[in-house]
Image (cartoon, rainbow, N blue to C red):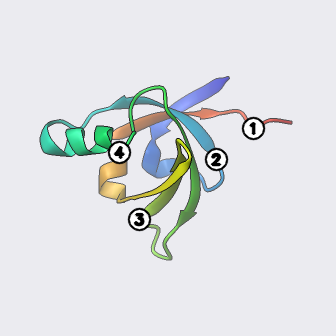
């Protein structure tokens, strides 16, 4: 069950979340959606570069890196971790 919404950039490492919305429009919005980052998709932060940018995500059986400037357009709801 989801707990609260936040920008994808703020999702802690090893946390999972469901994408709620993608605010990017135009070419950037299309590119983000083409990568599979659409509302309803579950993502997990699996790593960050030493300076916290980019962030590595796991979704739909593949790993994707995303710049924080791109992640700011994506709102997610954190999922409660399984016991």
Q: Secondary structure at mark 1?
A: loop
Disc 2 to disc 3, C-alpha distance? 16 Å
Residue at image location 49% in from the left, 32% down from the top:
41
Q: Name which quarter of the figure residue 64 lies in.
A: bottom left
Residue highlighted by disc 1? 81
Q: Where is mark 4, residue-wise?
A: 35
Name the side, left or right, on which 58 lies relative to 82. left
Asked if the residues shown at circle 4 and circle 1 are in contact, with their CB atoms under 8 angstroms apart, the answer is: no
Q: Distance of mark 4 from mark 3, alpha carbons?
A: 15 Å
Location of residue 55 with respect to 81 vertically, above or below: below
Please say if the residues under marks 1 and 2 sit with CB atoms less than 8 Å apart.
yes
Q: For marks 4 and 1, give the one nearer the viewer.
A: 4
Closer-to-camera residue (63/10): 63
Q: Residue at x 45, y 74 (%)?
A: 51
Which labelled disc corresponds to residue 54? 3
**Mark 3 neighbour class, 10 Å CA radius: few under 14, some 14 to 19, many 20 or more:** some
* Identity of the residue furthest to the right in this view: 83
Q: Quadrant of residue 42?
A: top right
Where in the figure is residue 44, as x and y percent of width and height? 58, 47
Query: Upstream in the sequence, badge 2 or badge 4?
Result: 2
Q: Tell me how far mark 4 sits from mark 1, CA to CA.
A: 25 Å
Mark 2, Cα crowd under 10 Å, few <14 / some 14-19 / many 20+, is: some
Q: Earlier in the sequence, mark 4 or mark 1?
A: 4
Crowdedness of circle 1 by 10 Å Cα count: few (<14), some, many (20+)? few
- The circle drawn on residue 55 is none
Pick whichever of labels 1 and 2 is earlier in the sequence: 2
Which quadrant, please, contains the C terminus?
top right
Which is nearer the eye, 10 or 19?
Answer: 19
Which residue is labeled 2 in the image? 15
SS class, disc 3: loop
């Amino acid at each position: 069950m989801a707990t609260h919404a936040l920008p994808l950039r703020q999702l802690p490492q090893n946390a999972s979340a469901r994408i709620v919305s993608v605010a990017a429009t135009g070419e950037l919005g299309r590119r983000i959606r083409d990568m599979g980052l659409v509302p309803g998709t579950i993502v997990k932060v699996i790593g960050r570069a030493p300076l916290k940018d980019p962030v590595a995500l796991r979704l739909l059986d593949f790993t994707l890196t995303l710049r924080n400037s791109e992640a700011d357009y994506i709102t997610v709801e954190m999922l409660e971790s399984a016991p």
